[in-house]
Amino acid sequence: MSKPPSSPPAPAANFIRNIIEADLASGAYAGRRWSGRPGPAAQQQAGAPDPAKIRTRFPPEPNGYLHYGHAKSICLNFGLARDFGGVCHMRFDDTNPTREEQEYVDGILEAVQWLGFGWDAFGASHQYFASDYFPWLYAFAEKLIEHGDAYVDSQSAEEMRARRGTLTQVGEDSPFRGRSVAENLDLFRRMKAGEFADGAHVLRLKIDMQSANINLRDPVAYRIRHAHHHRTGDAWCIYPMYDYTHGVSDALENVTHSICTLEFEDHRPLYDWLNEKLAALGLLNTPLPRQYEFSRLNLSYVVLSKRKLIQLVEEGHVAGWDDPRLPTLVGARRRGFTAEGFRLFAERIGVSKSDSWIDMSVLEDCMREHLNESAERRVAVLDPLRLVITNFPEGALETCHAPNHPLHPELGKREMPFTRELWIEREDFQEVPEKGFHRLYPGNTVRLRYGFVVTCTGCEKDAAGNVTAVHAEYFADSKSGTPGADNYKTKGNLHWVSVAHAYQATVRLYDRLFAHPNPGGRREGDAPDLERDFLDDINPDSLRVITAQLEPSLRDAAPEQRFQFERHGYFVADRHDSKPGAPVFNRAVTLKDGWAQRA
Ligand code: ATP
Ligand code: MG
């Protein structure tokens, strides 16, 4: 049986919470020391007891803008730190010199803060860059060489690949695996000094070419790259690989719970091997961080692959990284989605290890839920048709009042001028009404919401037979909120805007960018060799730009102010294109899901 609707849904399961609770109960990290900044064992052990109960980290590579999937990881890592008296480090995993830019660093910081999280805690900022650890990473590599745990390999990339083996076949030792410590140290130092071309040598960890786990078959720790780095400039021409950098960075930062997506599960033995080696050499503080994997967010109707997002932007299928249709967080913000909605979404979908798809409507419902609560109501006529109140005096004006929020009377009311000529929605009039139509048609009586009751008397048409205006007569004693107004019983309740006072504005009706739940994915009945292109699933109606007639108070909307346009959905004043006194509006989401029946 389902619960009564009044009880809020329980937060979804999050197995990492249980792990942290158990670790805190057993005091797993209780005795750790922290020097106040990242560093190796000796530095940390000279510090005070770590004031943070746990340390997590959010470690993006600054090579693109964050997307909805990252929001899940951000809410998880920062949320756990907040809930358990810890801190989440904002760490840039910037060890790949050629793809990273300051623009992306700035965009990522802004997005995390927009989601409502920060990295200041215990009197310090915890914003870090893996590139700041290059000197330690290098020194540790020399130590590993000295202890016979790393060697310089001079095979070509093809030779290395050929000896690596497969999932079913073990690998084969490199002919350079037996090099002496002295030769390895010499070559590695010369790699650092810039004596060799890209690809001439790599440094590999000496683990086990016969391992069933490919990640343990002597993974590459360093490669030569004569490339400029966005932070270290030309100081380095060798760069550490992700697997070599990541766990060490976690340990240097005293991270306790290193949470990542499932594809790193097979990397965990390497993560542990390396950190345990370095801890045994007295280089890393203990107890060491532990890695936990959860399933990444897969969301229907969007693509979350950076490669595909870049393609959409570069080929001009959207207007830029912050196009409201893109599943980026800058796009979401511009669209009028809210940080509260994302946090609610993260709470609701939970954290598990099973791969699953979440329907886009779950995210949209979270946005609706928060916007319904927080957005003031306004009136907008999106497809305007003129209504003439023939018995209302020309030039006269009645001031009507509409509540700003039905759930929050304390937010007060605003004035809506009622005049002889009003804009109504074209679809609210039918000359010959279809069955069940209760809005305007000749002879029918409706209420103009917050205004007066009117009876339709006819319409005007142009030569082609298109309706150009509707006529009606009003009842002067029917004004909403006045004594006796309730005596009028009507079925229709229409919204309207005074023609003389309306704010004529550009409104962009955004819809889902893809018309198929799995863009580019296979469909039932597809031939086995059919390759689909995700671009073919682009929804041709994902954006419609219209000129709408809005109630006058909307002229004063501030950029990023969000509203419910009654009967239409939630809208936001665009943060970039709005001018003072002339906002442009974007539709965030409709009032109800129109996609369920289409799919
Ligand atoms: P790339 O394809 O460049 O590796 P990425 O999506 O993994 O891209 P990162 O910048 O490495 O991007 O991601 C930062 C963090 O966000 C990582 O910890 C990663 O696990 C997490 N993350 C990325 N995509 C998702 C997703 N779809 N769901 C949940 N977490 C995600
Ligand atoms: Mg990644």
Image: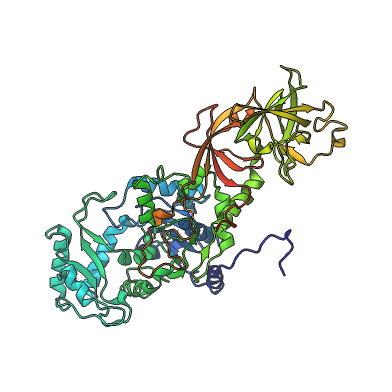
Rendered-image quarter of ligand 1: bottom left
- Is 242 in front, or is 143? 242
Residue extending farthest to the top is 395
Q: Is residue 586 left or right of residue 41?
A: right
| Place of residue 564 in the rendered image (x, y in percent of width and height, measured from the top left) | 63, 41
| Place of residue 339 in the rendered image (x, y in percent of width and height, measured from the top left) | 55, 49
The number of discs equals 0
Quadrant in which the C terminus is drawn: bottom right
- Is 236 in front, or is 168? 168
Q: How does the figure colour the protein chain or chains?
A: rainbow
**Rendering quarter of residue 179:** bottom left
- Is 137 in front, or is 499? 499
| Place of residue 11 in the rendered image (x, y in percent of width and height, measured from the top left) | 62, 63
Q: Is residue 79 left or right of residue 377?
A: left
Residue 148 can be seen, yes or no? no
Quadrant in which the N terminus is drawn: bottom right
Q: Residue at x 72, y 17 (%)?
A: 394
| Place of residue 58 in the rendered image (x, y in percent of width and height, measured from the top left) | 44, 58
**Rendering quarter of residue 135:** bottom left
Q: Residue at x 28, y 58 (%)?
A: 134
